[in-house]
Amino acid sequence: MLSSLNTLLPWVSIFIAMVIQETAIPSASWDILRPDMVIIGLFYWRMYRPDLCGPILAFSTGLLLDIISTTPLGLNALSKTVLVLLIGRHGKVFRALDFIVLLPIIAILVIIDETIQWIWIVTTSGYHFRWDILIGRPVATMIVMPLMVRVLIFLHRSWLEAR
Amino acid sequence: MDYFLVLFKEYRHSIVAAATIIISLLLLLSVRPGTRSPGFVEDVALDVVGGIQDVIQSPVGVYQDFSKRIVQLQEMDLENQRFRQELKTLRPLGTQVIELEMENQRLRQLLEMSIEPKLRSLGARVVGDTSTAFANVLLINIGRSHGSRINASVLVPEGVVGRVVQAGTSTSLVLTLLDLNSRVPALVQRSRVKGIIAGFNGQSLTMEYVSKDADVRVGDQILTSGIAGSFPKGLVIGTIKEVQEGDIGLFRRLLVQPSVDFDRVEEVRLLIPGQGYQPSERSKPFRTTKAP
């Protein structure tokens, strides 16, 4: 029973990351440098525990993000699902890389996520977005990633590997 | 059926991936942005997220309050410094305002003085006190070019200051009643006893040539008599403060307290006699306003 609950750790950790990202951080001062912690979570878990982090988790997380952030319903769900599939496809390669190389990769993933959303928004609603936030988000994600990955490694080892 | 089950197991990941992408696209295409009304699922999601947010944000809130307080204190400190600077600037300004108000009051009193119609009046400011131990003289800022002339009476609302003894082009010299050389014909208002008011470079005046049997009392008011002098009749000089009886001679000496505080004279009024004017014409007492 406990071990089956442990398998929910990716869900719980990504959910908490999403709550922090969407509700705690976005004050005026953090507006531009707002990290995408959900992508970090999905990246980590999809790389190291692909069995626990699949398209359903990405889709659910994205859908919840759409609800919370009032973006078009399904937009984050789509982009996050695509990202997870992309990470899964290159997971073995990513795992073999040095951590420092993963930093630009996470930035590229954030840019891909933004690009998918940007294309949709532009085609349906026109040019209503802020470039500074679009640029700031990959940078902030790279800055936050070492800390967050350290926390995820700790949770991973203490809750999943130890039992 | 088994075939499909096997097929699903074999391509499970791909099917799930495709399904999620298709559902996402369907959602995007079916729900128009801004038109969806919050449903039960969305309400629950927001409540859950909101609840967690409260827990997460509680230390954040404390920190934010603390930060705000620090910022407020810094702002208060800056504001305090700014106010101190402003106060330094405003303090002399306040003094200046009081000074102007007092000057205004004095000038109003000067203007309210009733002047004999045949006399021309000129306002002047005392610009210097050239008094020495042996002379009591004031310098005023009007001269011949303004109409000042020798022997013009110089007054303030409280009474006589003196007379012009020297008139330059733009300044004049006023010999005050306190000066040793000042002599003004005067009379006691109550008993009409006449005498000469003389200065002795002190803070008081003396009234000379008052006969020993004259009716004079301490407190009697002394006015100009208008006889043989430049002063119109009836201007206030002061009050008797002491009657000095001498053993020898025909006269007694009266010590008179001048009504004017000569140390505080700042603005004065000059009375310039017109053509055909006789100083003794004036019959009414001059003083119309009370000293402040």
Image: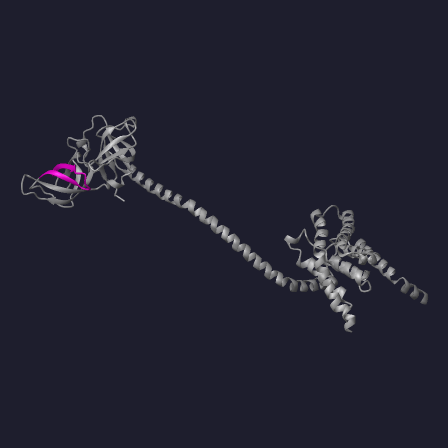
B59 lies above or below B254: below
Predominant SS along the magenta part: strand
Please check the rendered image and state whether residue B33 is part of the magenta-colored stretch, yes or no.
no
Residues rendered magenta in the picture = B193-210
Identify the residue shown where x is 37% and y is 42%.
B96
Horizontally, residue B216 falls left or right of residue B122, namely left
- In this view, which residue lies farthest toward the bottom? A1
The residue at the point 45 percent across, 46 percent down is B86
Q: Is residue A109 above or below residue B164?
A: below
Q: Nearer the viewer, residue B215 or B178?
A: B178
Q: Is residue B208 magenta?
A: yes
Q: Is residue B104 left or right of residue B248?
A: right
- The mark tally for this picture is 0
Q: Position of residue B82 (x, y in %)?
A: 48, 48
Residue at the image point whose x is 56% and y is 56% from the top: B68
Snapshot quadrant of residue B278: top left
The quadrant in which the C terminus of chain A is found is bottom right
In this view, B224 is above or below B77:
above
What is the x, y in percent for residue B290?
25, 43
In this orientation, which residue lies closer to the viewer: A84 or B113?
A: A84
Kindly indicate the quadrant of the structure image that contains residue A52: bottom right
Of residues A37 and B275, which is closer to you in this image? Answer: A37
Q: Is residue A84 visible?
A: no
- x then y, percent, for residue B112: 29, 38
Please give left or right for residue A135 compared with residue B124 in the image.
right
Q: Quadrant of the N terminus of chain A?
A: bottom right
Q: How is the image coloured?
A: one colour
Q: Could you tell me if residue B55 is visible in this image? A: yes
List x then y, in percent, for residue B186.
Answer: 15, 36
